[in-house]
Amino acid sequence: MAMRIANVFKVKGYRVDLRLIESGALLHDIGRGQTHGIEHGVVGGQTARRLGMPMELAHIIERHVGAGLTLEEARRNGLPKGNYVPETLEEKIVCYADKLVEGSHEVGIDSTIDNFAKDLGFDHPAIKRLQNLHREMSAVLSENG
């Protein structure tokens, strides 16, 4: 069963598939039904593929963990070889939005960065990736500009 999700708009000159973002936002943690560990993104991506969901959606599910995981970070964490850093604008939007929610509460990016630093160490490359993601999303999603 192949599914197609598309509802493309232009936002500040960027092509954005809003249905894909909505689907990714709803399903990004689907892997948590099997695990609450760092591997929930990979497990969720596998589930999405098995259910015939679009590859673009599977990538959102796989690439939302942390600020994305590099090939080396994936290896260190025992994940299958792969790129788990968000690449498309839709992947980045879902990943970023996920970092602004803890449980059922909205949090600021500074709180998220502080939590990353406490958990991973202040010099961990994920913090720089998160800061870069924040700058990029702020520019794309801001009311001005």
Image: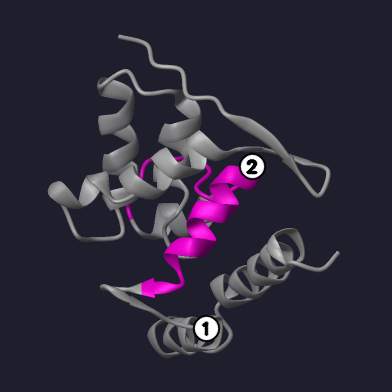
Q: Amino acid at mark 1?
A: Ile
Query: In 3D space, how far apart are the residues under numbered discs 1 and 2 (Cα atoms)?
Result: 22 Å
Q: Closest to the observer: 48 or 138?
A: 138
* Residue reaching furthest to the left: 34
Residue range (magenta): 78-101
Q: What's the residue type where badge 2 is placed?
A: Thr
Q: Considering the image in quadrants, where does the C terminus appear?
A: bottom right
Is 64 situated above or below 16? below
Please say if 38 is above or below 91. Answer: below
Q: Is residue 68 visible?
A: no
- The kind of secondary structure element at disc 1 is helix
Dot 1 or dot 2: first in sequence order is: 2
Q: In front: 105, or 115?
A: 105
Residue 122 lies left or right of residue 24; in this view the side is right
| Residue 8 colored in magenta in the image | no
Q: Quadrant of the N terminus?
A: top left
Q: Which image quadrant for residue 18?
A: top right
Identify the residue under disc 1: 113
Q: Residues within 10 Å of mark 2 (few under 14, many from 20)?
A: few
* In front of the other: 99 or 80: 99
- Reading the image, the residue beneath label 2 is 88
Residue 101 location in percent, x, y?
38, 72
Under tag 2, what secondary structure? loop
Q: Is residue 9 left or right of residue 108?
A: right
x, y percentage for residue 12?
Answer: 81, 49
Q: Position of residue 45 (x, y in %)?
A: 34, 36
Instruction: Name which residue lies at 47% across and 24% down.
Output: 5
Q: Is residue 90 left or right of residue 49?
A: right
